[in-house]
Amino acid sequence: MARQGIQDARKGVRRTVARTLVALAGMFVFAFALVPLYDVFCQVTGLNGKTSNQAQALAHEGADQDRVVTMQIITRGSPGLPWSLEAHTRQIRVHPGQSAEVHFTFENLGDEASVARAVPSVSPSEASLHLRKLACFCFQNQRLASGERFEAPLVFQLTRDLPDDIKTVTLVYTLYRQDAAPSRKSGTQARGGDA
């Protein structure tokens, strides 16, 4: 009888270990699938302020002269990336439907060439559905030699159907190192037409 109890206990332990391993494998797979699923969710719903990573067409709808929206522009670096990114204009007032242009300066303050990308996010997140980037340096990686700097434009439009309760839109660009990714060539000609 005692022997039967020991065998039953061993079967129970094996079953528990097997279930635990299956649960761990499921969590591991879910963790890797979460990022692409989250990106798709944000793209579909416009949540979390994710914006398009491709140039968009100008919406030819005329500016709404009765409304003015303040666009705030913030730039941030990343730990370990010796670059600076500065917006020449920190705040601009635009009419929905109007296109506007703002210039930025990138500079590599490090001792060697490196590759980075400016990743945008928008707040409030609902505004990301109404922000059209017509030309943006954020569509491609940028490669800068040590001490190199360059200017790049952002041409954007807030569509006329931006909700009336949104009076201020904040656009944040954060620089991230991209050394392992394909890069654009350094130099002014390689950067012409960043769209």
Image: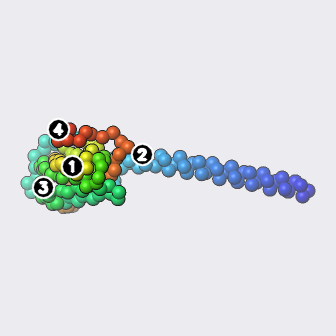
Q: CA distance from mark 1 to mark 2?
A: 34 Å
Residue located 34% across and 47% down the image: 178
Residue located 22% across and 51% down the image: 147
Q: Which mark is residue 68?
A: none
Location of residue 159 in the rendering, given as x and y in whole percent from the top left corner: 18, 49
Location of residue 141 in the rendering, given as x and y in whole percent from the top left corner: 29, 44
Q: Secondary structure at mark 2?
A: helix
Q: Secondary structure at mark 3?
A: strand
Residue to which mark 4 is pinned: 189
Residue 185: image quadrant is top left
Residue located 27% across and 39% down the image: 184
Residue to which mark 3 is pinned: 94
Q: Is the residue under label 3 in contact with that under label 1 (CB below 8 Å)?
A: no
Q: Secondary structure at mark 1?
A: loop
Residue to which mark 2 is pinned: 36
Crowding near pointer 2: few (<14 within 10 Å), some, many (20+)? few
Q: Amino acid at mark 4?
A: Gln
- Going from the N terminus, do you reach mark 3 or mark 4 first? 3
Give the mark toward the camera: 1 or 2.
1
Residue to which mark 1 is pinned: 148
Residue 194: image quadrant is top left
Q: Amino acid at mark 3?
A: Val
Crowding near pointer 4: few (<14 within 10 Å), some, many (20+)? few
Location of residue 106 in the rendering, given as x and y in whole percent from the top left corner: 21, 52
Q: Amino acid at mark 1?
A: Glu
Q: Is the residue under label 3 in contact with that under label 2 (CB below 8 Å)?
A: no
- Going from the N terminus, do you reach mark 1 or mark 3 first? 3
Q: Amino acid at mark 2?
A: Pro
Q: Is the residue under label 4 in contact with that under label 1 (CB below 8 Å)?
A: no
- Going from the N terminus, do you reach mark 1 or mark 4 first? 1
Is residue 39 found left or right of 195 in the rendered image? right
Q: Secondary structure at mark 4?
A: helix
